Every structure is written in structure tokens, then in C-alpha cells.
Amino acid sequence: MAGTSELQVEIVAADHFVWSGAATMVKARTSDGEIGILPGHSPVLAILAEGELGIEPVDGGRFGVAVDGGFFSVDSNRVVIVADNAQLTDAADSANAGIR
Amino acid sequence: MGAQIRVYRQKIASTTSMRKIFKAMELIATSRIGKARARVTASLPYANAITRAVSAVASQSEIDHPLTTEPEQIRRAAVVIVTSDRGLAGSYSAGVLKQSEALSELLRGEGKEVRYFLVGRKAQAYFDFRGRSFERVWTGGTDAPEFSTAKEISAAVLEAFGTDFDKGGVDEIHVLSTRFQSMVVQIPTVVRLLPLVVEEQAARTEDLLPLYEFEPETEKVLDALLPRYIESRIFSALLQAAASELAARQRAMKSAGDNATDLIKKYTRLRNTARQAEITQELSEIVAGADALNAS
């Protein structure tokens, strides 16, 4: 699985879909500390701490998502971020068709 | 005779104005139902992700968590009853409340004490009228539930579940709400929420779950996941109930409007008959009068 070079990221909040797309890196804060996910990461299921996630999409600039708790899972380059309340803080200019 | 026509006219006027209300409510329900269903759909990714995560944990480790442990003896059960705030939705709330009676009967038959958590003013009114007690009630916005309400409800039931029996805690929790199957079929359904039964995903190779690393440890992950799982279950029950409420209201208002139309037609006919009878009578009186004059 380490061959592919991008992550499929999905961010979902309790009552709506937030964002999905391809990314090169996801940075998240867990209760233990920061964790950076690059393509090929081993499967992880971790609890998010309140704070901001950083996402570097394949196209478009880096943007952040403010979450107040939740969890995320990584497996075979698929990152699912499940947040109680997610808010895009610095929306990338393009490729964000999924934003609501 | 004149009095009869007046009565019919009044009935026609009042039925017409009622029909206007029914039609308006039907239109409102119709326009909101799409939104309610969209919200059900929008909550699915979250629910699926949580379910997947919980079953990932379950399939990998022996879950030993207070929320999933079956108490040795179930002595007290709590029932969360989800109804609507407003009426004029046909048998929507009545159906749920009827089911709640059956469920209470069943639980009491098993020797359990029953506590109630209510959602919606209709349930509150039902309990108040019968002088029954309940633990808590949430009202307002049953046709457009917020996630924060689901959070509050799950916090309340989790607290009740976490309390010892001797201190008034409960050993199991049921949720009674209406499941939205289609626009015409909504079924009051009972789901046992706690203790949780985590279904491990079917062992099909294509959706075999990977071996996750957990961060922090498995127990902590479960501590964080399970309450969310419950919130998500409650929220989805609320959303489905909202869609069901609107669908039930739309149907009820449609048939009420149709009945009003029928009534108006019937009364119009009766009014016409009465008017004709009056005219006929007046005519025969005139003719009789003229005859009497001619004869003299």
C-alpha cells in the first residue's frame, strides 16, 4: 500500500459532511501529542484532542480544520476524521467542492 | 327553513377555512420532509465511521468495558420515548405511546422497574395527564433535532446507566422511536441501546478490518468511542423520528384536507336542497294564496 503517494481524506461531523479529497499530509493532535500522517502510514485509530488539524491537499494550499474532539482512523491510505464539530478555518482556494 | 340554510352556510365557511389550514400544513410538511431526509442521509457518514471504528476495536480485542457488560441481574430499565412536540400528525405520537405501554408491560412482566426519559411535548402531556413520573424531558425542535440534544440525552442516559442500582441507576436502556422506512411506512421501533452489543463485522475478506494501532491505549479509545457511538445512535433515532413525524403529518393533513373537501361538497348539496325546498314552499304558498283569492 505504500506505493501510492496520496491520502484519501474524509472529514465528517456529526450532522454533516465536511470535506473530502486527496491530500499529501494530514497533521492531527491526539491526546498524546501531534501525529503526522503521510501516505503509507500503518493503520491507526486515535482519539483527537481539541485543536486544529492541518491538511495539505494535493492541489490547493494548506488549510486547517478546527475540531473539538473526535477520532480518526487511518488504513491503507484512507484517512477518516470523525469530529464532533468541525470547522474549516482557512479554506483552500480551490478543490473544495465538498465544503458546506 | 331559512335557519337551516344559515346553518349549512356556516358549516361550509368553517370547513373551508379549516381546509386552508390543512392544505398549508400539508405544504409545510412536504417542504420540510425533503430537508429532514437529507439530514438523515448527511448523518450517515459519521454513523458509519463510528460503527466501523467500534467494530474494529471489537474485532481486535476482547472488549471489557462497563458499557458493554451485561449486568448480572437487570432490575431497572429506562425507556427513552421519542414523540413529537406538536399534534396534527395522525397517529404518529399515539403509535409510539401505545408501543411504550406494551414495552412497559413487557419489562414489568420480567420483574423490572421502568424509568422514562421523554422527548417531545406529546409524551410529556401523556405522562402529565396520567400523573406518571418521568426522569427528564426534552421538548422543542422535534421536527429538526440538533446534535446537541442527542448529546444531552446520551449524557443523561449514560449517567443513569453509570449509577449503581441502589442509588437509583438503571441496568438497561431502551430507545423507542419511529423508524422512517419510506414516505408511507414509519414503524415505531424499540432498540436496546445499553448495554451495548457490538456486532463484529461479517468476516468477508473485502471488508476485513486492518490491524489498527490504538492511540492512546485500547481502553482509552473505547472510552472515547462508545459514548460517541451512543450519541450517534440517539441522533440518528431523532433524525429518523423527525422525518417520520413530518411524513405522518403530511399524510394526516392530506387526508384531513380531502375529508374537508368532501364535507364542503356534501354541505353545499344539502344547502342547495334546502334552498330549493324553501323556494318550492314559497311558490306553493303563493299559488295556494292566489287560488284561494280566485275561488272566493
Image (cartoon, grey):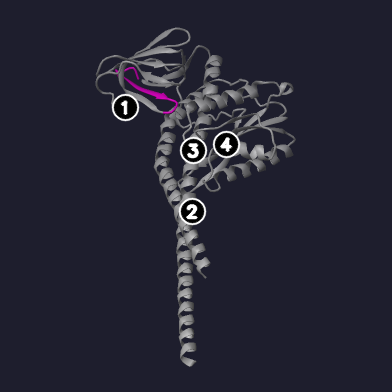
Residue B103 relative to residue B245: left or right: right
- Return the residue found at the far top: A33
Question: Could you say which disc has been placed on residue A98 in the image?
Answer: 1
CA neighbours of label 2 inside 10 A, class few (<14), some (14 to 19), many (20+): many
Per the image, label 3 sits on a secondary structure element best described as: helix
**Residue at (47, 60) in percent of width and height:** B12
Cα–Cα gap, marks 3 and 4:
14 Å
How far apart are the alpha carbons under marks 3 and 1?
A: 26 Å
| Residue that protrudes farthest toward the bottom in the picture | B295
Q: Residue at left 46%, top 50%?
A: B22
Residue at which label 3 appears = B242
Which label belongs to residue B121? Answer: 4
Q: Is residue A6 magenta?
A: yes
Sort mark 1 into few (<14), some (14-19) or many (20+) by Cα contacts within 10 Å.
few
The residue that label 2 is drawn on is B256
Who's the residue at 61% across and 20% down the image? Answer: B65
Q: Dots 3 and 2: beta carbons under 8 Å?
A: no
Q: Is residue B171 visible?
A: yes
Q: Amino acid at mark 3?
A: Ala
